[in-house]
Image (tube, rainbow, N blue to C red):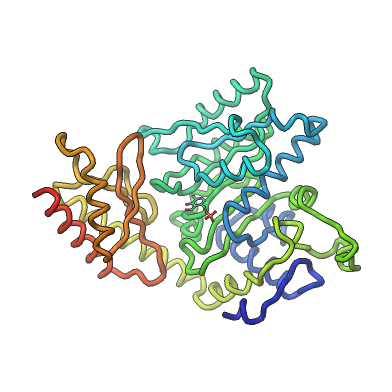
Amino acid sequence: MLCSGFNVVGFNWISSPAATELESIVLDWMGKMLKLPSSFLFSGTGGGVLHGSTCEAAVCVLAAARDKALKELGGWENITKLVVYASDQTHFTFQKAAKLVGIPPSNFRLIETSFSTGFSLSPENLRFAIEDDIKSGLVPLFLCATIGTTPSGAVDPIAELGKVAMEFKRWLHIDAAYAGSGCICPELRHYLDGVELANSISMNPHKWFLTNMDCCCLWIKEPKLLVDSLSTDPEILRNNASKSKAVVDYKDWQIALSRRFRALKLWVVIRRHGLANLMYHIRSDIAMAKRFEALVGEDERFEIVVPRKFALVCFRLKPKVEEEDLNCKLVEAINSSGRAFMSHAVLSGIYVIRCAIGTTLTQQHHVDALWKLIQDKAQSLLM
Ligand code: PLP
């Protein structure tokens, strides 16, 4: 309400010093909560910006990585040589972003994952893919590693992938859209180990951090690369503050010129709840997910397909040969009841039902009621 009511249009520092300065401050607060190295913070040598979505953040960092690489290679004609790497669990938004910045879709490598690695990206397989491409005359550009993949919450091994990215001098981006919020808790922070090897990292407070849509934090070690790629300098926007280079002009850190006062909502969330309450929120969601997982485990008709990650449980009715699409029918029955909405994923060909606890108002009794609904619908189906 405040953000809409004030209607600040802060494209550069001079148009709203308050919106700009507050954004830099909350990005540093958030970065410190996640214990990001100072190389990502304004108080260190990097900086952060608020985007509306991970997709926008991905387009911007890919553009920065692309332009840096093309400069090194000597020209735009080399764009068809650039290759982007991700796992087959990486959010599809990165494929869209790569296409948008001109990377040929055939140069997007989706490296296969499996149950054996818990659906995380294997550094060895990444190395094989990179070496193959180099042999074919292509140029590795960018690797996206994920902390908390969308289908199952899998975590890629950042430290090991970071070493491969460094060896080949490629850009490493970490997508922590969903699970990044969890990393404010000391017991989950280890998932970010190795973040110091990344060039950029993003997470969405609008997913699991009590923040309303839309809010995506992007931190980058060398903001200059983003600005080199995205800046525009029309006469109408020239001013002494920008000329001094002592201020941040966020229009050069994003796609659009105009921007909302998003920092205000993250500021309100952090000030209103405080770190201890935000950690409590994450932990209580995880406790509810653990309880849900235990309930599933107690019912012999069901099974947990992959071990729970964060507050996401992937489960299914045990397969019966004569009824292959039983789980799909179960999801349809739950959703058409109008009482709950569940989504699914397919992991190595296996259809799984996803139960993700994470919205602001979810309480234990909602989760218990959901489980009862699932059991009732399963009972009818099995009969
Ligand atoms: N990355 C991950 C891991 C996600 O789970 C999602 C959304 O579910 C996204 C990226 C896409 O985020 P956005 O809608 O902000 O582009």
Q: Is residue 227 visible?
A: yes
In the image, 104 versus 317, the foreground residue is 104
In the image, farthest residue toward the top: 135
**Residue 34 in the figure: left or right of residue 315:** right
Where is residue 374 shown, x and y percent of the image? 21, 57
- The quarter of the image holding the N terminus is bottom right
Where is residue 145 shown, x and y percent of the image? 54, 42
Task: Indicate whether 55 appears above or below 13.
Answer: above
Q: Residue at x 63, y 31 (%)?
A: 83
- The mark tally for this picture is 0
Task: Indicate whether 140 appears above or below 194.
Answer: above
Q: Residue at x 40, y 63 (%)?
A: 358
Q: Residue at x 86, y 57 (%)?
A: 233
Where is residue 379 shown, x and y percent of the image? 12, 53
In the image, 53 versus 309, the foreground residue is 53
Q: Residue at x 59, y 30 (%)?
A: 106
Q: Is residue 197 visible?
A: no
**Residue 314 in the figure: left or right of residue 250:** left
